[in-house]
Image (spheres, helix red, strand yellow):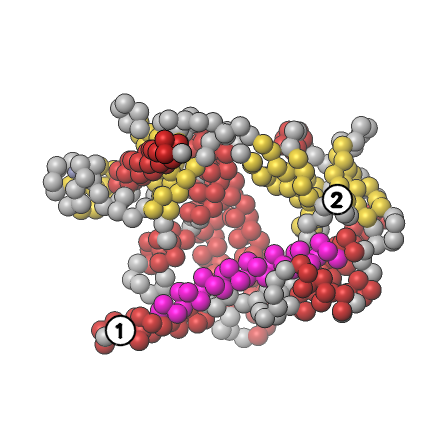
């Protein structure tokens, strides 16, 4: 199976100023080109390369931007990508909006108010068409540049075409040992030049082929509240493990500072204008803090994913897939629960786990999570949920057991994983028999 990964390597600090200036001009011109092309696209435009290339040609974009056709093509791809993902988001939104409208039309008096609120909220949240107000990058491939290994003091170079026709330049990168390890034996498909906090980085997309391992053991993962993972492996005696994000306190600390800053800002907003400067200072600080918090959070999600991949090595694993997060909205009377859920991105954690497992040649599947949390191991659904000591318990009225709700759900997910895989194998065997 193919494992894709982006490796982010800073441009070397010894890069000359003139090269950095040229890099600055190039990335600014690309941003300009992308926003010009974006201006030619509307929701009615058919989203394919041919149409956009014609629009670009008719509007003299290449002459206006002075970019080579390779660069212009890559800008087209960037705009296409943005509009396609907008279409996806909008299509999903439209589906939900239409359904909400339909429900509202058929609603009786008691459900009406709630549905009206939902329709209004959806109206406010209609996805907007792509805009490029800030610096934006596009993927650069062999047409305009490549990443090369060096032999002397600089180990890695970014080779790119410049704005001057036929001229290229070589920018040294500053990879760490870890970066080089990531690039070893991987194919480089393309890269982006990204500017962050005044520094340039090459974001290199790599593809690596990993042999898929066939396993015949199964397991399940349930993502719980409070950033825990409940894992059950179906051995002769099922093995269970709860993985915690150990550094959660650090995130809580960030959350506390952010919350107090937010409330300070809320009160500053309503006082005299001379406090405005202070307000803007706070809002800058807030942005910084959020960025830092996000970095910490992503880092710990990787750590947790790594632990999960290690624990589940050699097993076929399913993760419960849920729309639970999307159904939590403001005003449903569960503010504290929503807050706890909001702190952890379930989707991101799932992707990280699948990724870490893929690096080991293991596939991960998503299964429908419905009823996995309210069915006891004995098969009964006559259960009650109890919260106690920060954990959630399942009390079964049929068999009388008291189970950790997360582990119980993971167990049910593991069963689903096994049943699914066995079904697939049986079907394959039947097909072979009938062929
Ligand atoms: Zn039971």
Q: Give the left or right position of residue 266, taking residue 199 as reference.
A: left
Q: Nearer the viewer, residue 24 or 149?
A: 149
The region drawn magenta spans 72-100
Q: Quick check: 31 left or right of 153?
A: left
Instruction: Confirm if mark 1 falls within 8 A of ligand 1.
Output: no
Secondary structure, magenta segment, majority class:
helix
Q: Nearer the viewer, residue 387 or 409?
A: 409
Circle 1 is placed at which residue position?
107
Residue 130 is inside the magenta segment: no
Q: Residues within 10 Å of mark 1 (few under 14, many from 20)?
A: some
Does any portion of residue 89 appear in the rendered image? Answer: yes
Label 2, ligand 1: CB separation under 8 Å: no
Q: Secondary structure at mark 2?
A: loop
Question: Which of the 4 image quarters holds residue 129?
Answer: bottom right
> Looking at the image, can residue 228 be seen?
no
Point out residue 284 in the picture as x, y percentages from the top left corner.
59, 59
Q: Between marks 2 and 1, how big is the CA–CA gap?
A: 57 Å
- Rendered residue at 57%/53% (across/down): 288
Say which label, 2 or 1, has the lower sequence index: 1
The front one of 332 and 292 is 332
From the image, tell me which residue sits under label 2: 142
Vertical comparison of 330 with 270: above or below? above
Q: Say left or right for 286 vs 345.
A: right
Q: Is residue 99 magenta?
A: yes
Q: Residues within 10 Å of mark 2 (few under 14, many from 20)?
A: few
Classify mark 1: helix, strand or loop: loop
Outermost front residue: 435
Q: Position of residue 317 (x, y in %)?
A: 39, 34
Q: Quadrant of ligand 1?
A: top left
């Amino acid at each position: 199976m193919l494992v894709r990964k982006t490796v982010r390597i800073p441009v070397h600090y010894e890069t000359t100023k003139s090269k950095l200036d040229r890099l600055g001009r190039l990335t600014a011109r690309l941003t300009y080109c992308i926003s010009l092309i974006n201006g030619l696209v509307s929701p009615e435009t058919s989203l394919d390369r041919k149409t956009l290339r014609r629009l670009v040609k008719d509007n003299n974009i290449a002459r206006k931007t002075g970019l080579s056709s390779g660069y212009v093509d890559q800008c087209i791809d960037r705009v296409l990508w943005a509009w396609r993902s907008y279409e996806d988001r909008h299509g999903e939104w439209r589906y939900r909006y239409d359904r909400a409208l339909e429900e509202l039309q058929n609603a009786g008096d008691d459900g009406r108010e709630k549905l009206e609120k939902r329709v209004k909220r959806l109206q406010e949240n209609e996805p907007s068409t792509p805009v490029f107000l800030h610096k934006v990058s596009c993927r650069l491939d062999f047409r305009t540049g490549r990443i090369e290994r060096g032999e002397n003091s600089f180990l890695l170079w970014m080779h790119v075409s410049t704005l001057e026709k036929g001229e290229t330049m070589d920018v040294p990168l500053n990879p760490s040992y870890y970066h080089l390890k990531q690039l070893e034996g991987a194919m480089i498909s393309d890269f982006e030049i990204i500017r962050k906090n005044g520094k340039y980085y090459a974001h290199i997309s790599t593809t690596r082929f990993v042999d898929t391992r066939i396993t015949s053991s199964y397991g399940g993962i349930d993502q719980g509240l409070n950033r825990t993972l409940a894992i059950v492996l179906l051995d002769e005696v099922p093995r269970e493990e709860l993985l915690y994000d150990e550094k959660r306190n650090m995130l809580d600390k960030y959350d506390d500072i952010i919350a107090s800053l937010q409330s300070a800002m809320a009160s500053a907003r309503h006082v005299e204008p001379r406090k405005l400067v202070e307000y803007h200072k706070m809002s800058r600080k807030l942005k910084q803090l959020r960025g830092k918090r996000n970095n910490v959070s992503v880092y710990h999600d990787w750590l947790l994913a790594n632990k999960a991949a290690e624990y589940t090595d050699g097993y076929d694993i399913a993760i419960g897939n849920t729309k639970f997060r999307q159904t939590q909205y403001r005003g449903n009377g569960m503010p504290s629960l929503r807050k706890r859920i909001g702190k952890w991105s379930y989707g991101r954690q799932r992707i990280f786990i699948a990724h870490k497992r893929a690096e080991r040649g293991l596939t991960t599947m998503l299964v429908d999570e419905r009823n996995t949390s309210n069915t006891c191991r004995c098969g009964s659904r006559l259960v009650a949920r109890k919260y106690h000591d920060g954990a959630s318990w399942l009390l079964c009225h049929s068999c009388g057991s008291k189970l950790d709700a997360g582990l119980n759900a993971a167990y049910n997910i593991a069963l689903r994983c096994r049943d699914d895989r066995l079904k697939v194998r049986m079907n394959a065997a039947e097909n072979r028999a009938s062929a």
